[in-house]
Image: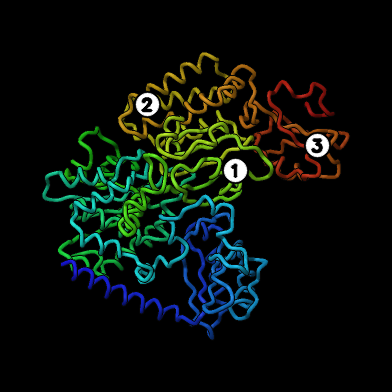
Amino acid sequence: MSSEIASAYQQLKETSQSRWTDLIQGDKPVIMVGTATCGRAAGALDVLESIRKTLGDDHQDIPVLEVGCIGHCYAEPLVIIAKPGGEYPPLLYGYVTPEIAQLLVRDYVFGEDPSLEFLLGAMETNELLPSMNDLPRSTYEHYIILENCGRIDPDNIDHYIATGGYGALAKSLQMQPENVVEEIKKSGLRGRGGAGFSTGAKWQICRDSESDYKYIICNADEGDPGAFMDRAILESDPHSLIEGIVIAAYAAGTQEGYVYIRAEYPLAVQRVTKAIEQARQSNLLGDNIVGSNFSFDISVFQGSGAFVCGEETALIASIEGRAGMPHHRPPFPAVNGLHGKPTIINNVKTLASVPRIIDRGADWFSGIGLNATKGTTVFALAGKITNTGLTEVPMGTTLRDVIFEIGGGIPEGRQFKAVQIGGPSGGCLPESALDLPIDFDSLRDAGAMMGSGGMVILNEDDCMVDVARYFLEFTQNESCGKCTVCRLGTKQMLNMLDDITKGEAKLEDLVTLEQLAHDIKAGSLCNLGKTAPNPVLTTLRYFRDEYEAHIHDKHCPARRCYNLMAYYILPEKCQRSCDACVGTCTVEAIYQGKTGIKVIDQDKCVKCNTCVEACPPQYNAITRISPLSELPEAMPPMEKK
């Protein structure tokens, strides 16, 4: 049987390589445009149209491929141009507009000018041009899960197979299932979706459970604010996920699989659905996969976007057609899950890691990382950071390296204040935690968690009380309502935070707030409820002085809590001839006094900040004042009506 599987896969690979070579035609330039959601939001589809229009009917044989996200989202739209046999390796261009795209086609695709003024870097190290490998961030990054993203056509299975895809599946099918489980155990792979449970142990539990039918579910219900890692993988490299699912299904003895994707990810749904159909046509799903005795298939299930359905028992209820509410564990899904059958639930990054482990060996994977946390992790960098986008680093990399070396630090000369890691269920860590190694245990001890991999950077202009209120409001709104302690407890915490941001709380309320947070952690049914207070607890732990300033001094140090601040036009800076602020105030709260100086009517002002944005930077005449007691006693003429 092993020889038959090997022969079937080899024939499949040779066929895919032949078809892919025919498509790109070897001697022709190849143009790749990043059209994942991040690229589309920046105008990639217009760039794509411009390229095709510029090529014209006479050059339709030049392949123009839509690829996924390479991670450098800050520089989207991105275009890669490869000219086989040319002087340069494949070149990556950033911040491409339709006009720049025309120039690239005219000057480089048709000519010999590489248009270096638009170059982000060469895709390979070379002596002629700066390379992406020369960037400071490349010293810290180690792409495993993301290694294909932005480099292959996600809609073409031949491209994936031609580069070695599904080879790990063929290798697994030639092993005994229990040996595949042992290889994953040996690798030290832990779930990349939050808690970090051993992946191999979970598979073993499911395999050992007595049942006539078993399931596997990929949890792609990515709902954290600021998180987009899973979406990028689904849109950029869906076949690595499918291959990981099939290997896991074979190892654990499951017969049917689901990819649970939120409907708000239409492109991800489209590309995964197409990839599944292509896998079926290539005998990589369905009956007797790659000539083996193993049969298995996958369906896509679209969730309605409820955050709580990221919790595995709520996710199962959703697939079964019931309200997405968690239930008590044990029994755990690996024993009693979908339709009462043993069910494996792993997230996207976990399953996408599996083919690499099988292909390169457990020892290779376990050699990456720190202590009990092996391999790499993927982060989405968002918020007040220069290089927004994706990165993949070895476990144990410090927060400082991720934020400042990879993310490029804080833009506009502002100061770092905190990082919210792990989504709404994570915590806010201060500057003193920047040298903390990124691993499950270190982050948990600091009051945060790895979570799915969202990392939101905050600067000096962010109020930590308001940040805690924002994340708690999110989890409170997304609570399924099943637990009284979660449903009512988070609402009461939110009310207390609202009072603090308004300057209406007392110092003793902080004791009550902290105690209530611990009660909710102890009394909630699911992990989403248990972790909902984390942003509050970590901000109380690391930024308590800001809470006390709001309560005792009626002062928001960051000048973000509108009830504790006012907008004021500085008479010595206001220019009489400038009406920028007057024209942008939607509530007509700004008027001109007798001397021509602009004045803000404090009773009308809704503190929307548009006047500050409108005021020319050379004047900088509008300031935010907190506390209100700092408003000048002597107002300019007509400021008080």
What SS does tag 2 mark?
helix
Mark number for residue 521?
2
Vertical placement of 222 versus 542: above or below? below
Q: Nearer the viewer, mark 2 or mark 3?
A: 2
The answer to whether one can see residue 482 in this image is yes
x%, y% of residue 476? 42, 32
User: Along the horizontal axis of the image, is 625 left or right of 331?
Assistant: right
Report which residue position mark 3 lands on.
598
Q: Residues within 10 Å of mark 3 (few under 14, many from 20)?
A: many
The type of residue carrying mark 3 is Lys
Looking at the rendered structure, the kind of residue marked 2 is Lys
Rendered position, 333 above or below 119: above
In this rendering, position of residue 417 left or right of residue 147 = right
Question: How many marks can you see?
Answer: 3
Secondary structure of the residue carrying tag 3 is: strand
Residue 306 visible, this orientation: no
Q: Quadrant of the C terminus?
A: top right
* Three-letter residue code for mark 1: Lys
Query: In the rendered image of this protein, does residue 238 appear above or below residue 434?
Result: below
Alpha carbon distance from label 3 to label 1: 32 Å
Return the x and y of residue 570 as percentages of the image width and height: 80, 33
Cα separation between marks 2 and 1: 29 Å
Residue 171: quarter of image: bottom left
Q: Which mark is residue 60?
A: none
Q: Which residue is mark 1?
A: 384
Task: Categorize mark 2 by other alpha carbons within 10 Å: few (<14), some (14-19), many (20+).
Answer: many
